[in-house]
Image: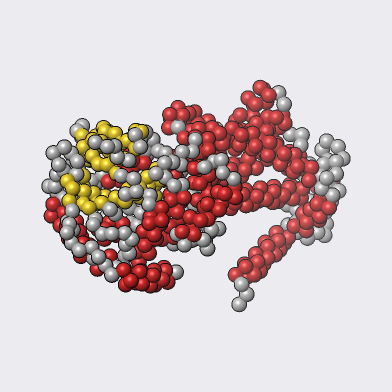
Amino acid sequence: MSKSFLEVDGLFKIYPDGQGGELTVFEDIRFALEKGEFVCIIGHSGCGKSTILNVLAGLDEASAGNVVMNGKEIKGPGLERGVVFQNYSLLPWKTTLNNIVFAVRARWPEWSKEKVKEHSERYLKMVGLDHALNRKPSQLSGGMRQRVSIARAFATQPELLLLDEPFGALDALTRGVIQDELVKIWEETRQTVFMITHDVDEAILLSDRIFLMSNGPNARIAESVKVDIPHPRARATIFQNPAYHKTRDYLVDFLVNRSGSALPEKDGTPKIVEPAKGVAQSTPASFDSETESESDTAARAVNA
Amino acid sequence: MASLNVRAALLSVSFLILALGLWEMATQPPEAQTGMTEYEMLMGGADQESRVPPPSAVLKLAWAELSNPFYDAGANDKGIGIQLGYSVYRVLTGYLAAMAIALPVGFLIGMSPLMYKALNPYIQVLRPISPLAWMPLALFIIQDSDASAIFVIFICSIWPMLLNTAFGVANVRQDWVNVARTHELGPLRTAITVILPAAAPTILTGMRISIGIAWLVIVAAEMLVGGTGIGYYVWNEWNNLDLASVIFSILMIGVVGMLLDLALGKAQKLVEYKE
C-alpha cells in the first residue's frame, strides 16, 4: 500500500466524565488525505470534529493513535499546517496588512521587508481586501475578518490547511460570497484542505470528498462520500448538476436518519460511497461562466 | 444652543466663582469693635482667633510663588517648583524601580500557574500593608531618608502593576496564543509580539493605579522624612502657621497628580485596542 500525504491512524479522545468514569468522544478514527484534495467533515455537534482538527493542527492531543504527514508524525503545531479558526483569531491591535505580515514573517524570517509586504498584499488582493490594508479588525465586518484570516492561512502556503467551520458565524449572503472566494483561491493554489462544516451545500460546493461522522459519544468517521462534480464549480450553477442533488439527498439522509447507527468498514476505515455514480456530469459551459461572473458581481454589491 | 463643552465650561466657572465668593465671605475678619477688651489691648489689637485665609490671599501667594518657582534661599525656603521637583523625582524613581520588578515578575506569574500559586500567599500578605508602615524598617536598613522615601514609593506602586500584569497575561485569549503556536513562535517572541500587546491595556491600567497611589503616598512619606519635597513643604508651612501656603500647596499637589494621571491615560490610549 502506497503511503498517503496524511494518514490518521486509530485516533481516540477520552475524557474523565466527572463521575469517576470515562467518556470516549470519538474512537478509532482512521482516514487518509491525498495531496491537493479538499475534504470536508460533517457531523452533529458533540462528535468531536473540532478535536480531530485540533489534533491535526497540533493544538490538542489525542488520547491514543497518531497522525503522520509526509512520513513524519505530527507532534505540536507547525507552519506546514495552517489553521483558519471559526472566530477569525486576528490580532486586534494589528492592521489587516500587519496580521498577514506577522504570519509571512514567521514563515520566511529570511525575507526582506519589501518582499514580505508585497507577498502579504498579494494574498489580501486575492480575497478582495486590498482597499482595507490599514484598517484594524474591529473596523471590518465579520465577513471581511474571515477573509483576512483565510488570506493569512493561504499566505503562509502550508502543506495542509485546516478550516474549523470558517463560515459558521457569518450570515448567509456573506457566507456565499466568501465560499466563492475560497473556491477561486483553491482553484488557483490547489492546497490540501481539511474543513469542518455544518452546511451540506457548502460541503458539496467545496469538497472532493465528504467525511460523515456518526454521533458521539464513541463517534466514528463512518463514510467517505465522493463528490462527483467536476471543477471548477460555482455556487450559482452547481445545483443544475444532477449529481449535486443525488449527493445532497444522500448526505441529508445520513445526517437525519442514519448518523446514530452508522458504522465504518470492519477495518475501521470509512465506507466509500459514490451516490452520484453514473449520473451525467455535464453542465453547459458557456452558460456556466456567464452566470458565475454575473452572480459574482451581484454578490459583491450585496456585500459592499 | 451652545455645545455641551461650552455649557459645561460656563457651569464650571460659575461654580468656581460661587465657591470662591462664599469662601471669601466666610473668612472676613469680624467688624472692628469700638472698644478693645483688656486682653485685646494686651495682645496689641490682634484677633483672638486665627482664621483660614481668604482666597484672595491664597491667589496673591500663588501668584508670587508661581512667578518664581525655582528660587532657593536656604534649607527651609525653596520655591514650590523645587519642592514639587523633589517629590516627582522620588515618585518616578520608586515607580520605575517597581516597574522593573513588577512587569517581569507579573509575566512570570501570569504565564506559570505554578509560580502564581507559589507566590500568591506572599503577595496577599504584603499587599495590604500600608506603605508607611515600612518606613521605620526602611530608615533603619537603608540609613538614608531620601532612599527610604523612594523605597516606600517602590513598595506601594509595585502591587497594582504586578497583579494587573499577571492578570492581563493570564487572561490573554487562548485563540491568540494558538495563533502564535501555529506560527511556531518561540516563547520569547510569543511574549513580545502576542502576549505583551494583548495584555498591554490591563498592564497600563495597573500602572495608572500605581502612579496615583505613589503620588498619594509621597506626601505622607515626605512629612515623615522631612528635608525636601512637597509633603515636607506642607508640614513646614503648617508649623509656620502659614495657612495660605498650605492651601496653595494642597492645590499644587492636586494639579501635579492630575498631570501624572493624564500622562498615563495618554499612554493607555496608545496601547488600547478594540476586539
> Is residue A51 found left or right of B67 in the rendered image?
left
Q: Is residue A173 left or right of residue B245?
A: left
Name the residue at 81% across, 55% down.
B63
Query: Which sits in the foreground, B244 or A75?
Result: A75
- Taking the spot 68% from the left edge, 65% from the top edge, the residue there is B13
In the rendered image, which quarter contains the C terminus of chain A?
A: bottom left
Horizontal and vertical percent position of residue B200: 54, 45
Where residue B53 sits in the image (x, y, percent)? 75, 53
Write the residue at 83% across / 40% down.
B77
- Relative to B143, say whether A3 is above or below: below
Residue B161, how many percent across, how many down? 56, 39
Expressed as whole percent of the image width and height from the top left, the position of residue A14 reads 24, 35
Residue at (81, 59) in percent of width and height: B32
- Mark yes or no: residue B39 visible: yes
The relative height of residue A238 versus residue A266 in the rendered view (above or below) is below
Q: Quadrant of residue B232?
A: top right
Q: How many marks?
A: 0
Q: Is residue A104 above or below residue B129?
A: below
